Image (spheres, helix red, strand yellow):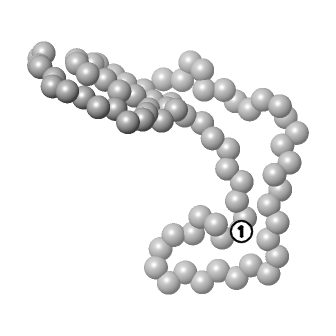
Amino acid sequence: MPGFVGAVQIISIGGSGIFNVGDVFQLHPVSSSKVFSGAGSFNTGDHIAVTNHYSATNTYDNDTVDQGIMFTL
């Protein structure tokens, strides 16, 4: 159902963001990232005790291209 939209101010849109005004059937924002982190980095919750005597993150990536996100629906 069409409608009238008043003034719109966009400050910024991220790299995988979508801005739409009007009717739409489907939107597919797609993004990709590679994350390197050490031991115990992504622990969440209450009262977590993590003991890491030695933590080394290997960031060596010998391939030049990872899997692409083209044609992803």
Above or below — where is 29 with respect to 58?
A: above
Q: How many marks?
A: 1
* Residue at figure coordinates x 66%, y 26% from the top left: 68
Residue 69, position in %: x, y? 60, 26
Q: Amino acid at mark 1?
A: Ala
* Residue at figure coordinates x 67%, y 50% from the top left: 35
How packed mark 1 is, by other alpha carbons closer than 10 Å (few <14, some 14-19, many 20 or more), is some
Most foreground residue, 52 or 18: 18
- In the picture, the quarter occupied by the N terminus is top left
Most foreground residue, 49 or 8: 8
* Residue at figure coordinates x 16%, y 23% from the top left: 5
State the image quarter where residue 53 is shown.
Answer: bottom right
User: SS for tag 1?
Assistant: loop
* Residue at figure coordinates x 83%, y 56% from the top left: 58
Residue 52, position in %: x, y? 74, 78
Most foreground residue, 38 or 18: 18
Most foreground residue, 8 or 30: 8
- Left or right: residue 30 compared with residue 63: left
Above or below — where is 1 with respect to 63?
A: above
- Left or right: residue 42 compared with residue 37: left
State the image quarter where residue 8 is shown.
Answer: top left
Query: To which residue does mark 1 refer?
Result: 39
Above or below — where is 37 with respect to 60?
A: below
Residue 39, position in %: x, y? 71, 68
- Left or right: residue 59 compared with residue 5: right
